[in-house]
Image (cartoon, rainbow, N blue to C red):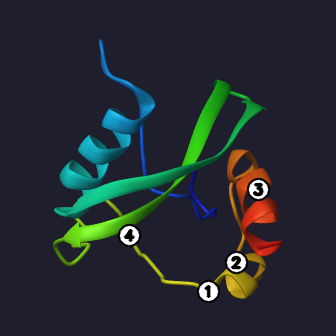
Amino acid sequence: MGGFWEFPGGKLEAGESPEQALVREIREELNSEIEIISYINEASYDYDFGTVVMKTYHAKLVSGNLELLEHQNSTWLAPHELKTINWAPVDRPAVELLTKK
């Protein structure tokens, strides 16, 4: 998704729950451990290459420094700053919910 910002995460592996997949992806992509706090939403978007279904969660960093192992860039944003960057379409419903809190 070049040119767009995305929340971290990725595809589920066989037998994984969405929560387990997120914990694994953060470990693999950012060399960090998280704890899932709560569910935010589920959204889907039909891209040219197929439909992406994404579940978003609140999580807290347990250990690590969010080291970029597979990504070009990262940023920390306060909820009121989330709309200042160009989000991938499937991420936008979560951004809307997070900016209303």
Q: Earlier in the sequence, mark 3 or mark 1?
A: 1
Q: Of circles 3 and 4, which is in front? A: 3
Mark 2 falls on what kind of element?
A: helix
Q: Of circles 4 and 2, which is in front? A: 2
Q: How many marks?
A: 4
* Image marks 3 and 2: residues in contact by CB distance under 8 Å: no
Indicate the position of residue 11 as horizontal and vertical percent values. Answer: 41, 30
Look at the picture and state if 101 lies above or below 44. below
Q: In the image, which disc is placed on residue 92?
A: 3
* Mark 3 and mark 2: Cα distance apart in space: 10 Å
What residue did someone put label 2 on? Answer: 82
What residue did someone put label 1 on? Answer: 78
- Observer-nearest of 85 and 80: 80
On the picture, is 89 further left or further right than 53?
right
* Mark 1 and mark 2: Cα distance apart in space: 7 Å
* Image marks 4 and 2: residues in contact by CB distance under 8 Å: no
Q: In the image, which disc is placed on residue 37?
A: none
* Mark 4 and mark 2: Cα distance apart in space: 18 Å
Q: Earlier in the sequence, mark 3 or mark 4?
A: 4
Mark 3 falls on what kind of element?
A: helix
The residue most toward the front is 37
* Image marks 1 and 2: residues in contact by CB distance under 8 Å: yes
Three-letter amino acid code of the residue under disc 4: Gln
What residue did someone put label 4 on? Answer: 72
